Image: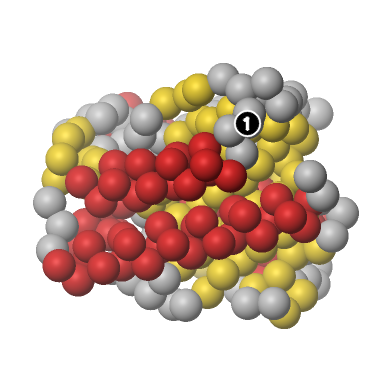
Amino acid sequence: MPHDELLSLATNIATQAADLVALRRREGVAVADRKSSSVDVVTHADRESEQLIRRLLAEARPDDSFFGEESGASTGTSGLTWVVDPIDGTVNYLYGIPHYAVSIAVVEGEADPATWRALAGAVVNPTARETYTATLGGGAFLNGERLQVAEAVDLSEALVATGFSYLKETRVEQGRVISQLVPQVRDLRRMGTASLDLCMVASGRVNAYFERSLKPWDHAAGALIAQEAGATVKGWGENAAGIDFILAAEPSVARVLEATLAGLDI
C-alpha cells in the first residue's frame, strides 16, 4: 500500500479515536488502573480508545502487526506494524488539561525503534483541533499546512521541551540535569505529552525536545513528523531514538544540545 494510503487510514482512525476520548472527557474520567508507579495511570477511555483503533485497523489491514500501549502486541504477516498510543498525555487528560493526543504510526518491521522504518504517522489533539501528519519522504503537515522546524538559534535562545519519568529515582536524576540546563537555555517547557512535544519541534513552537524513558508508542508518529519537518531525531551518538534517550531539534541545535546534555551526565 502506498504511504499516502497508509497515512489516510492512520489519520481517519486517529480522528475517530480522538473524537471518542474527547466525548469521554466531557462525560467524566475515572482511573482504571496504575502501571509503573502510583502516579502512572490508565483510564477507561485509554482502553476504549485502543479497542476502537485495534478493531478498525484489523478490519482494514488484517495481515498487519499491532503494538499498543494498553493491549500489547499481535503478529501479522505483511511486515508492517501499527504502533499506537490511544491517549498520549493521560495525566493531562485525567485533570482536564487540554493537551493530549491520539498517536498512530505504521512502521516497516518490528515494534523496535532501533530497527523499524516509520512510513506514516498521525497525531491528533482533539481539544486544539490540530492534526499533525507525515509520510516518509513526503513532508510533515499541520491541518494540511506544511511544517518546517524553527531556524537555528544559539542554545541560550532555545526554548526546550522535556518530560519526566514516573519513577521517583529517575525523576531525581532528571531534576539534577534540569537545574543545570535551565541557566543555559531561554527556558524549559514540560507539557506532558511526548507526541505533541515532537510535533511542536516540527511546527517551530519549541526549538528542541529531549527525554528519557519513552516507550515506542510515545514517539513513533511524532518522531517521523519532526524528522519530516527538518529536525534531527536521534538517540545518543549514533544510536536511534529509543527508551534510553530521544532528542529532536534543528540539526545544529541538536548537536549543541546533545553535547551539553552529555556534559551534564544525563
Colour mode of the rendering: secondary structure
Furthest toward the right, the residue is 137
Residue 251 percent coordinates (x, y): 82, 54
- Left or right of 39, for residue 155: right
Judging by the rendered image, the residue that carries numbered circle 1 is: 64
> x%, y% of residue 109?
72, 26
Q: Residue at x 45, y 55 (%)?
A: 102
Q: Nearer the viewer, residue 243 or 79?
A: 79
From what the image shows, is residue 64 above or below residue 230?
Answer: above
> Residue 179, how many percent across, how many down?
44, 50
Q: Residue at x 45, y 40 (%)?
A: 54
Residue visible at 22% across and 65% down?
Answer: 25
Establish if 58 lies above or below 189: above
Is any atom of residue 9 visible in this view? yes
Find residue 106 and report its image quarter: top right
Question: Where is residue 238 shown, x and y percent of the image?
Answer: 80, 29
Q: Amino acid at mark 1?
A: Asp
Give 130 or 227, whichever is nearer the viewer.
130
- Along the line of sight, the residue nearer the viewer: 264 or 190: 190
Q: Is residue 85 visible to us here?
A: no
Element under disc 1: loop
Comparing 49 with 90, the one in front is 49
